[in-house]
């Protein structure tokens, strides 16, 4: 990988869910050596600190379960403006509602370049609820619905919706009935863990990357901790058994690096309060290293 200019953006978002702890995620990535790793690989790194939204009055909603609606909209607006053009942003989260803003900003950058934006969603959940359909009220379960222009997002920033054919959800294994119906109607490409068990993780990813290449697209990767099996990544409040293994996850990152297509990255749902001696934070940094060019055999033996 050629030297790249990275911008680290702290997104201490914790309003998309009720369990506290994700607001500590950005600092955990800093302590785990994310910037130092990128510099060791020969890249330029600028950490612009943590983004903070402007205060705003509460916003009521017809769904009584919805919480922190105004705050979440504020985060979306702030994060959409946070990434400078012509640099590779890494959004350090923070719960997955941060992608409402991070990807919104990337759609604007892609439009300015007259290129389509594609999204690889590495997650146990498709996050395809709307504020109307959610029964938990947790808005971290809504980003892909918002970004593809599904109804029910009045008051959120205006956007040009993503083409649903430009999305690949990889590693899903927990999908609510309402989401299943909406995903089928929208014809979103989902590669669940059953498909991965049967066919491996490389083939569907290569097919998606070929689609991005053919379209001359930019690729945003949104990596949720719960994409990984909780046995290797316990620091997340939404654990689902049967996630990606250590090698599967690194293979995904190495294939992404080889493609040369990735232009922006989310690291989301890290809850350091639930971690074990920084195990998950270090793994997420290691996976980012694979995405940025480090090979699995370059890793030193560790003693815990």
Image: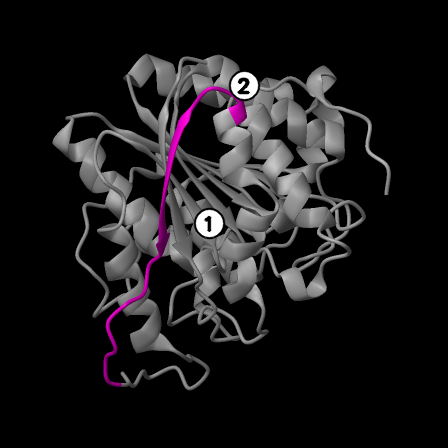
Residue 203 horizontal/vertical position (percent): 61, 18
Q: Is residue 188 above or below residue 183?
A: above
Q: Determine the image quadrant of residue 25.
A: bottom right
Q: Is residue 154 above or below residue 94?
A: below
Task: Give the Cα separation between the discs numbered 2 and 1.
Answer: 19 Å
For label 2, the crowd category at 10 Å Cα-Cα, with few meaning under 14, some 14 to 19 and many 20 or more, is some
Instruction: Judge whether residue 201 can be spotted in this image.
Output: no
**Residue underneath mark 2:** 293
Q: Is residue 258 above or below residue 226?
A: above
**Residue underneath mark 1:** 92
Q: Earlier in the sequence, mark 2 or mark 1?
A: 1
Q: Quadrant of the C terminus?
A: top right
Q: Which residues are magenta?
A: 40-57
Residue 60 horizontal/vertical position (percent): 29, 86
Q: Nearer the viewer, residue 34 or 256?
A: 34
Q: Nearer the viewer, residue 301 or 153?
A: 301
- The secondary structure type at the circle numbered 2 is loop
Q: Is residue 46 magenta?
A: yes
């Amino acid at each position: 990988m050629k030297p790249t200019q990275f911008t680290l953006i702290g997104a201490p978002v914790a309003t998309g869910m009720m369990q506290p702890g994700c607001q500590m995620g950005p600092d955990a990535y800093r302590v785990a050596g994310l910037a130092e790793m990128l510099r060791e690989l020969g890249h330029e790194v600028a950490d612009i600190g943590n983004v903070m939204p402007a205060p705003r009055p509460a916003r009521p909603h017809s769904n009584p379960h919805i919480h922190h609606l105004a705050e979440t909209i504020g985060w979306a607006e702030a994060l959409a403006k946070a990434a400078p053009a012509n640099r590779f942003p890494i959004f350090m989260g923070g719960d997955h509602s941060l992608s409402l803003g991070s990807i919104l900003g990337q759609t604007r950058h892609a439009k300015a370049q007259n290129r389509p934006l594609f999204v690889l969603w590495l997650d146990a959940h498709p996050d395809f609820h709307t504020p109307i359909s959610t029964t938990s009220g947790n808005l971290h379960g809504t980003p892909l619905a918002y970004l593809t222009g599904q109804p029910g997002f009045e008051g959120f920033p205006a956007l040009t919706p993503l083409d649903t054919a430009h999305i690949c959800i990889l590693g899903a294994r927990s999908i609510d009935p309402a989401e299943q119906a909406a995903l089928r109607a929208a014809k979103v490409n989902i590669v669940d863990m059953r498909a991965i068990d049967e066919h491996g993780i490389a083939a569907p990813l290569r097919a998606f990357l070929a689609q991005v290449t053919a379209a001359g697209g930019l690729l945003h990767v949104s990596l949720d901790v719960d994409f990984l099996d909780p046995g290797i990544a316990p620091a997340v409040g939404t654990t689902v058994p049967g996630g990606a293994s250590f090698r599967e996850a690194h293979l995904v990152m190495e294939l992404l690096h080889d493609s040369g297509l990735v232009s922006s990255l989310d690291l989301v749902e890290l809850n350091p309060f639930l971690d074990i001696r920084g195990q998950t934070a270090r793994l997420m940094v290691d996976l980012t290293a694979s995405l940025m060019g480090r090979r699995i055999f370059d890793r030193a033996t560790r003693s815990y």
